[in-house]
Structures are given as structure tokens and as C-alpha cells.
Image (tube, rainbow, N blue to C red):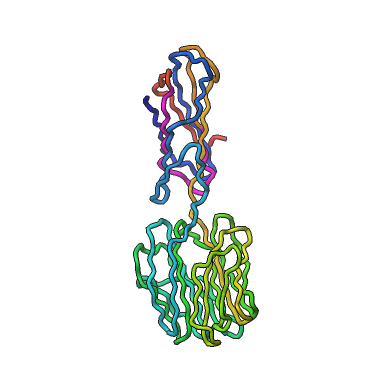
Amino acid sequence: MSNEQLPLNAEPRAAETGRYHLSRKLLKAFGSRLVDSGIRSIRQIFALACAACLLSVFGFQNAHAQINVDSTSSAMANTNNLTWSHTIGSGSNRILIISVSNRDGNKTVTSVTYGGTALTQIGFQNGPGNQNRTSLWKLLAPPTGTASIVVTLSGSVNVVGGAVSFDNVDQTTPHGTFVSANGTSTTASVNVTSAAGEVVIDTATANGDAVSLTAGAGQTAQWNTGTGTAGGNVRGGGSTEGGAPAVTMSWTLGASKPWSIGAVSLKPVLVPDITLTKSVNPAGVQPPGTDLTYAVDFSNGGGVAGSSFLITDPIPANTDFKVGSVTSSLGKD
């Protein structure tokens, strides 16, 4: 069986539709309808941001990629220079989020580096009376492999550091607005504006004599540790939760103590959302010699353009492809 290849030189832009027409001549009559039961073995290859994905005609590609947790690490000490190692995997569209929980809010983080590359602060929140401090930092497209995280503070203090690397995060707008809260109670919480397909990451900080931190229902703890249970110690924890229009991130403290919490919603990288359908005219049983016109309709409902679009359509048995009959159009209603 031979194939027709139907290349589309233009890129199907977001929310755009188009159509291919091709003709085949019927060589022999069938005893049943001639409409294909499906466009079998059709391939469309889309290259987006130097990444390729293979789609099936009847497998619908989401309009965004799924954000994945790559790896997690943490460390704690009484120091002004907290250092630990973290490994970044080979997934595409990566981001590294590093969170710092320190006991004395008057001691600030002056820099965070990964493999010598400086991170950018996303936001921070001090606890009541500057009892403690939570801060989040980011690095887009961190290199793969293992390197050292170095958190430098303005003075020696009890400190916890946590790191989570993700892939499939949008590299232009990687996250939403940083939100935070503080209080003195047994529950630390903050409300985050998010969306389906996004992932919320938070960090909670409490004085050491809170004794424990427990992540709320629906959250996945990525790290949870402390320097001790005395008042001068610190405890910090970080968690993730799938996005929704509104997400509440919460932690339960073992005792009512001052706390601070910060969170941000990570945004997934967008991908094309391509659908294909095929029809034939005339349909039904036809006599030999009839010209059959097949129409392949395609649309891109995703947020970004697709490129290198290729359809390979097997010629059905008992038909003959009419050379030169292929036409295409973009922007069809």
C-alpha cells in the first residue's frame, strides 16, 4: 500500500483551521460503504521550541504540557551560609524553586546560587514581630546534572532550605503572583489564584517550638524539617498541589506559634492542540470509475502555533490516487 504525503508549509496558528482536498479514483466496487473506518497510520509531527511530539489522529493533545516534579532536596543548620547539593534532570522547560525558612526575620537572605548562577527572589514574608522569615527564589532553565545550592544570609541564624526542580514550566511567564500570610496560631494558610494544569508550590515557616508542621489535605510534602524544637530553632516545610481556580495551601503546627507562609502557582508550557477529521464525497457504495474526493479538516485550538505539519494518508484498497489533486487552505471557517 502506498501513501500520499500532505505537507503544510505554513504553521497552523493558534485557534486556526484548514482543509486538504485530494481525489482518488475507484477501481472496483465494494459491497459496503467506502468511507474509511478511520485515518489509520496518519502521522502529524509538530516541532515546538525545538521539541517534537508525535500525535495520533484520534489522540487529542492537551493545550498545555503536564508540569512534573523532577527532584527535591533540603538542608538545615545554624549558619550564615547554607550549602547542599541538588540534581536537575533532563526534562525540557525546567525551573528550579528554592525556599528558605529562617528563625530571625531580621536576618535576610542576601543571595541564592545554583552551580554559581544567581537565582531571582520571587517574594518573601516575615512572621509576626519578625519572629521568622519565608522567601522563595527561582532559576529558569537550570543546567542538567548535580551542583551546589548556596544560600547566603546577612548573619548566622537557624535556617532550613528546600529545593524542587520542575519540568514543562512556561519559560516566558513561569508563575503567577506571589502571595503570603502570617499569624500566630496552629494553622498557617494562604489562598492562591491558580488554574487547571498549573501547580502551586508553597513554603511554611514556624518557630522551632511549634514542634511539627503537617501539610494540608491534597498537598504533597516535598520537604519538612527543622533545626530543633527550642524556641530559637526553626522548622520549614514545602509542598505542592495541583492547580484550580482557587487553592488554599495550609499547614498544621504542633503548637500555637508565630508562622509565615508564601506560595506561587507555576504555569505549564503551552503546546499545539491539533484535531483532524476525514470525510469522503460521494459517500456510500459507488460504481467503478467514480472520483472520490477526500477532505481532511484540521484545527489548532492550542495557545501556540504548530510547525512542520505532515499528514501521511494510506491509499485505501481498490482506489487510485489522482496526481495533482491535492489542495490546501488555512483560515477556513
Which percent across, then down, holds residue 252? 61, 73
Tell me which segment is drawn in magenta: 297-316
The quarter of the rendered structure image containing the N terminus is: top left
x then y, percent, for residue 65:
49, 52
The correct choice, above or below, for 1 with respect to 250 in the image is above
| Picture quadrant of residue 40 | top left
Residue in front for this viewpoint, 319 or 174? 319
Q: For the point 43% across and 34% down, which residue is it?
A: 311
How many labels sit on residues? 0
Residue lying at the far right in this picture: please name it. 185
Give the image quarter of residue 147.
bottom left
Q: Choose top left, top right, bottom left or bottom right for residue 202.
A: bottom right
Q: Find out whether residue 133 is within the magenta segment.
A: no
Between residues 296 and 14, which one lies in front from this camera angle?
296
- Residue at position x 45%, y 79% from top? 76
Q: Position of residue 242 (x, y in %)?
A: 56, 59
Position of 105 relative to 39 (above/below): below
Residue 299 part of the magenta segment: yes
